[in-house]
């Protein structure tokens, strides 16, 4: 009888420790975000923000692509599989793409991607598509900050199945 009570207390203690660790991890959570930035506009906008010494969250790992239309949905899924809590795709404004219509292709892929992510149980807010031109350093900072705040509020991404 005493042995059963001891193992029950031990199991309860382990469960409490696990719950406390999870709560602490969520309280200290800083999201990891992968940002796919087009070389000609969005990356240049990020460079402008950096050159102007604008302050923005360090949570985004930038992947420079020649065109946002080059961002394959598999890249995004691989980012989540690799531990990203969110993905940001930044493109040239409509009509400004150096490759004519790559940003339109990226927008269409993003819409399809949101449906795929929903099937994997990933919230749409974890994958944002937006436009930043080379001269929009302030806009770049605003979008990054909003994305980090959004993903932080959602909490860590649970493991993909």
Image (cartoon, helix red, strand yellow):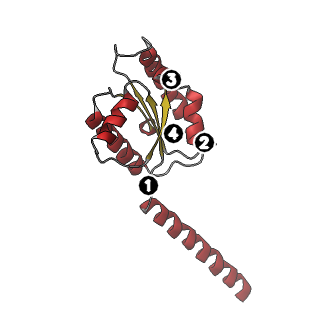
Spatial distance from mark 3 to mark 4, Cα to Cα? 13 Å
Looking at the image, the residue that sits furthest to the top is 100
Element class at badge 1:
loop
Residue 29 % position (x, y): 45, 57
- Relative depth, front residue between 148 and 25: 148
Residue 3 placement (x, y as % from top left): 73, 85
Q: Is residue 94 left or right of residue 112?
A: left
Q: Which of label 3 and label 1 is nearer to you?
A: 1
Q: Which residue is mark 3?
A: 112
Residue that numbered label 1 is attached to: 30
Task: Say which residue appears at 49% left-offset and 62% top-offset.
Answer: 25
- Give the farthest residue toward the bottom: 2
Which corner quadrant of the image does residue 160 belong to?
top right
Locate the N terminus by quadrant.
Answer: bottom right
- Distance from the alpha carbon under mark 4 to that under mark 2: 12 Å
Report, in whole angstroms, how far the alpha carbon at label 3 lies from the one at label 1: 28 Å
């Amino acid at each position: 009888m005493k042995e059963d009570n001891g193992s029950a207390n031990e199991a309860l203690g382990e469960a409490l420790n696990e719950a406390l660790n999870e709560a602490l991890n969520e309280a200290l959570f800083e999201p990891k975000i992968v940002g796919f930035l087009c070389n000609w506009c969005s990356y240049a906008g990020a460079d402008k923000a950096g050159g102007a010494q604008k302050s923005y969250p360090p949570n985004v790992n930038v992947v420079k692509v020649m065109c946002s239309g080059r961002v394959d949905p598999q890249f995004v899924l691989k980012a989540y599989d690799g531990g990203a809590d969110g993905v940001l795709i930044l493109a040239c404004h409509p009509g400004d793409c150096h490759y004519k219509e790559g940003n339109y292709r990226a927008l269409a892929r993003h819409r399809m991607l949101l449906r795929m992510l929903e099937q994997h149980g990933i919230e749409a807010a974890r994958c944002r598509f937006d436009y930043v031109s080379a001269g929009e350093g302030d806009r770049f900072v605003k979008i990054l900050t909003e994305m980090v705040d959004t993903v932080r509020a959602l909490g860590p991404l649970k493991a993909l199945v």
